[in-house]
């Protein structure tokens, strides 16, 4: 079963979901029943017992493929880059984000995703 990123965010919130994805992206994990979740479980060690308990309630006793959330992570990177570009040069942004200057210019010249969704 593939776990949709939006379902994970709804269950445990964006910060914990990002930690989960950062550690387990693309991996297949066993989600035990909530009562069998222990402090030494990798999910608990990554996002804490409270968030892990909420997460395993979604798919108890199932093997779940953790999402990569690439689109979300790229959107977040681009949002942060646009903010940095207000005070940093294209060269500095390129070094900071590990991309080319040309890509920096493409990102800052393209409309932000949230601006596109707000248009009538």
Image: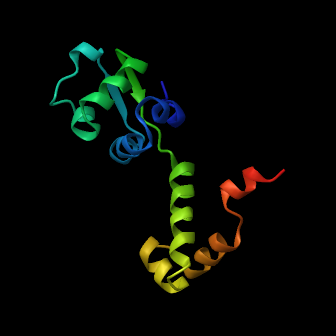
Residue 62 percent location from the top left of the image:
38, 18
Residue shown at the point (35%, 22%) measured from the top left: 56
Q: Viewer-proximal residue, 91 or 27? A: 91
Q: Viewer-proximal residue, 116 or 70? A: 116
Residue 38 percent location from the top left of the image:
17, 24
Q: Viewer-proximal residue, 37 or 13? A: 13
Asked if 11 appears above or below 33 in the picture, the reply is below
Left or right for 39, reference 48: left
Quarter location, residue 60: top left
The colouring scheme, among rainbow, by chain, secondary structure or one colour, is rainbow
Residue shown at the point (46%, 83%) measured from the top left: 92
Residue shown at the point (50%, 45%) measured from the top left: 69
Asked if 115 appears above or below 100 in the picture, the reply is above
The total of numbered circles placed on residues is: 0
Q: Viewer-proximal residue, 90 or 98? A: 90
Residue 109 percent location from the top left of the image:
69, 73
Left or right for 102, reference 68: right
Residue shown at the point (20%, 30%) measured from the top left: 41
Asked if 98 appears above or below 5 in the picture, the reply is below
Residue 5 percent location from the top left of the image:
50, 36
> Going by the picture, which residue comes out furthest to the left?
40
């Amino acid at each position: 079963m593939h776990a949709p990123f939006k379902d994970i965010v709804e269950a445990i919130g964006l910060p914990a979901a990002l930690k989960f994805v950062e550690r387990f992206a693309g991996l297949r994990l066993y989600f035990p029943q909530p009562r069998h979740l222990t402090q030494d479980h990798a999910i608990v060690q990554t996002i804490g017992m409270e968030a892990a308990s909420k997460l395993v309630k979604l798919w108890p006793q199932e093997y779940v493929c953790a999402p990569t959330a690439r689109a979300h992570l790229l959107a977040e990177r681009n949002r942060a880059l646009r903010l940095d570009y207000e005070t940093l040069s294209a060269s500095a942004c390129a070094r900071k984000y590990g991309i080319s200057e040309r890509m920096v210019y493409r990102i800052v010249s393209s409309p932000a995703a949230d601006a596109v969704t707000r248009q009538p």
